[in-house]
Image: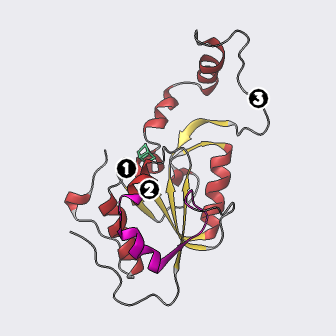
Amino acid sequence: MTATAPTTTPPRKIRIATASLAGCFGCHMSFADIDTRLLALSEWVTFDRSPLTDWKTVGECDIALIEGGVCNAENVEVLRAFRRAARILVAVGACAINGGLPAQRNHHRVEALLTHVFETDRHLAPGSRVPNDPELPLLLEHVHPIHEIVRVDYYLPGCPPTAEVIWTFLMDLLAGREPHFPYPMLRYD
Ligand code: SF4
């Protein structure tokens, strides 16, 4: 079932921000899978900070779509900034909802993982060390779903959520309807 677009033009363009934290950009790709409907969407919304725009900081916006869990200090900072800026914050995809596949690292100590990848792997050049430049964000001991850091208003399940789910969700919000997904539209893989 395809959602219907808003019947009346919103009084002002809805402002949407998007972010990828510990994500793979697959949820953003699924968003792009709405294909030519992006043209229709551009009539109703404008984009704030997003991998699709050049805004470096997030400004006040109506909807924040967050892909990815939280794996490092920078993710925490960005997520909190999006929460402060957005009226509605949405966890998009399995990683944002429950940490997703990256959370499999929670079975190991982060120090052991870093040492293995950067120092003891047999393919490394002699003398390789774990990167320690202060510009690099420190990894958290565990990968977290975003609701462990900030309040979340909606969850879009799937890895990634389908383009139909993303489209239906946005059309519902733009039309002022409570988002609703028919059962066949939902998936967690
Ligand atoms: S939910 Fe899946 S598609 Fe989305 S960021 Fe995570 S791994 Fe990528």
Q: Label 2 sits on what residue type?
A: Val
Q: Quadrant location of the N terminus?
A: bottom left
Q: In which quarter of the image is residue 43?
A: bottom left
Q: Give yes or no for residue 34 being in the magenta stretch.
A: yes
> Residue sitting at 48 percent across and 36 percent down?
102
Label 3, label 2: how many angstroms apart (C-alpha)? 31 Å
Q: Is mark 3 on a helix, strand or loop?
A: loop
Q: What element carries label 2?
A: strand
Q: Do callouts 2 and 1 mark residues in contact (Cβ within 8 Å)?
A: yes
- Which comes before the other along the chain, label 3 or label 1? 3
Q: Is mark 1 within 8 Å of ligand 1?
A: yes
User: Residue 8: horizontal and vertical position, in percent?
Assistant: 38, 90
Tag shown at residue 160 = 1
| In the rendered image, the vertical position of residue 84 relative to residue 45, given as above or below | above
Number of numbered labels in the structure image: 3
| Residue, disc 3 | 132
For label 1, count other residues whose C-alpha is less than 10 Å away and answer few (under 14), some (14-19) or many (20+): many
Label 2, label 1: how many angstroms apart (C-alpha)? 8 Å
Q: In screen coordinates, is 132 left or right of 189? A: right
| Residue, disc 2 | 92
| In the rendered image, the vertical position of residue 8 relative to residue 41, given as above or below | below
> Residue sitting at 39 percent across and 82 percent down?
176
Q: What stretch is highlighted in magenta?
A: 32-52
- Which comes before the other along the chain, label 3 or label 2? 2
Q: Does the residue labelled 2 lie within 8 Å of ligand 1?
A: yes
- Which comes before the other along the chain, label 2 or label 1? 2
Q: What element carries label 1?
A: loop
| In the rendered image, the vertical position of residue 143 relative to residue 65, given as above or below | above
